[in-house]
Amino acid sequence: MSRSASHHPSAEPSLASSGVPDYPDEIDGAVLKVAGVVVLGAIMSILDITVVNIALPTFQTAFAEDPANPLPYSTVAWTVTAYTLALATVIPLTGWAADRFGTKRLYTLAIGLFTIGSALCATAATIEMLIGFRVLQGLGGGMLMPLGMTIMTRAAGPARMGRLMAILGVPMLLGPIFGPILGGWLIEVASWHWIFLINVPIGIVAVLYALWALPSDRPEPSESFDVVGMLLMSPGLALFLYGISSIPGEGTFMSTKVLVPFCIGLVMLVAFVFYSFRPKHPLLDLRLFRNRRLSVATITMFLFAAAFFGGLLLVPTYFQQVRGEDTLHAAFLMVPQGIGAMITMPIAGSLTDRIPVGRIVPFGLLLITGGMFALTQVGTDTSYWGFMIPVLFIMGLGMGGTMMPIMTSALKTLQSHQVARGSTLLNITQQIASSVGVAVISVVFTNYLKAAPLAIPAIAAQKDPALVDQVGGPAAVEEGLAQAADAFGSTFLVAAILLCTTLVAASFLPRKHEESHLLDDVAEGAPGVVLH
């Protein structure tokens, strides 16, 4: 059965005479206790992404045989893509595994797997080893968010979902603020290995907290595992993204290394979509897309995550490669974005309980899109205080009013027994979109950079002054950095155009009040939120 809050009196709402759970209006201590478990797990997963983002330029030189010839950006970007791809792979397994092994046991296992993966990442001697260990990390981290979202939805009830989802958004606030700073500081005072080693003590604390706070439950397997769906989706997605990410190295889409995995992966994904409507319990319940509100929210989420997270990945790299900032200073320059999100996310969460998201999300997207268009103007001497910091702050304001309201809108339209499957669908959509966005944007950026003959040598010379004469002198370095800035600006333009498509999708979000259906089946005597 694996109910997220069963067998735990303080976490369960009382039952009214009708049999419908009687949720209090305010956020009480019992709910906050459960929320604390979810938030800590989400912090571990999300913080790790932002920590690694700041380290990508370091990986380019640390794993290169010759510092004057750093690894391509598209290669080190796989440390992010592999992690998010692993998240997307394991998310659909979470519901079945929770029914099979129990929610509490699975949650602690996921944290433990993430912690072990982190320790192994610190031992990586090559970029290929690091990418492989990042997959192991992602297999653990991917189970945390769908389990957590189901637990939160069950604990909150329909009237408090916006506020509870805002609490779940705390990691999204802490990640952009403290992740880059923590990563930058650790790289500067120690080495890149410590951005992974730091997860070990946090993971131990998280396991102990979960064992104490989460209710015990009895594993009661209720569904067969969709083996065929898994064999189609996971390899198909991996091959598809591998083909896209191989374009910069091959120089053309028509290369065998690009075309073969891309086409095979695409065929497998299309086959997975058609197959998913056949089994009673598919790996991903695509039947939920019959719900128009969920469909619109999912499409909006996919477009937003692909464009925003793909483009955002380049900002700290710009600070380090074009402006010559070290990792710690580049991290501090990213703080305004997190502060902006901190301001708007709790406001948006509260408003979502009362106002249709169609009147909230478009304003956030407009701020993000405007900020991305502004980033197309970056150069070698762009003002920090007069341009970069205000732009990143505005984008943070937009982010705080976008992602969690979209998720809340989608989940509130589902019935209780559909919430876990719906949260799984939303989570895997976000992770696949992030993987696709990072892969596509890194391909675009690498191609722009290759088209600028002096850019890559100039970036290497800025990090190592001994290479200046090899590049052609200070004037050549200056010209090369200008070419690199143009490459960043052109890539930001691609991300901005993609964000414009998100605005189109968001215009279809509900603009009128719609009743929540979360308790419809509970009133009829159906079970509560069950993990699928």
Image: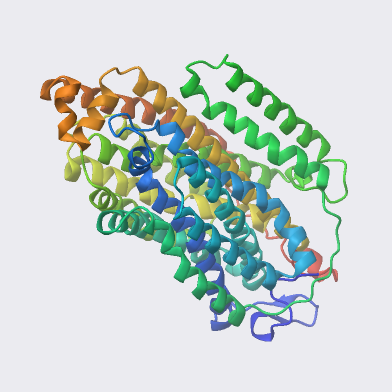
Q: Where, by quadrant of the figure, is residue 444 drawn?
A: top left
The residue located at (39%, 41%) in the rendering is: 312
Task: Choose between 95 and 254: the one closer to the eye.
Answer: 254
| Picture quarter with the N terminus | bottom right
Q: Where in the figure is residue 415, as x and y percent of width and height?
A: 75, 60
Task: Choose between 307 and 105: the one closer to the eye.
Answer: 105
Query: In the figure, is residue 350 to the left or right of 149?
Result: left
The residue located at (77%, 59%) in the rendering is: 96
Q: From this viewpoint, is residue 353 visible?
A: no
Q: From this viewpoint, is residue 481 visible?
A: yes
Q: Residue furthest bottom?
A: 9
Task: Choose between 138 and 373: the one closer to the eye.
Answer: 138
Query: In the figure, is residue 410 to the left or right of 169?
Result: right
Count of all numbered marks drawn on residues in the image: 0
Q: Where in the figure is residue 139, as x and y percent of width and height?
A: 61, 54
Q: Where in the figure is residue 174, as x and y percent of width and height?
A: 40, 61
Q: Residue furthest left?
A: 474
State the colouring used for the structure image: rainbow
Q: Where, by quadrant of the figure, is residue 296 drawn?
A: top right
Query: In the figure, is residue 303 to the left or right of 308?
Result: right
Query: In the figure, is residue 2 to the left or right of 64?
Result: right
Task: Choose between 367 and 330: the one closer to the eye.
Answer: 330
| Picture quarter with the C terminus | bottom right
Q: Where, by quadrant of the figure, is residue 186 drawn?
A: bottom left
Q: Where in the figure is residue 322, as x and y percent of width and height?
A: 24, 34
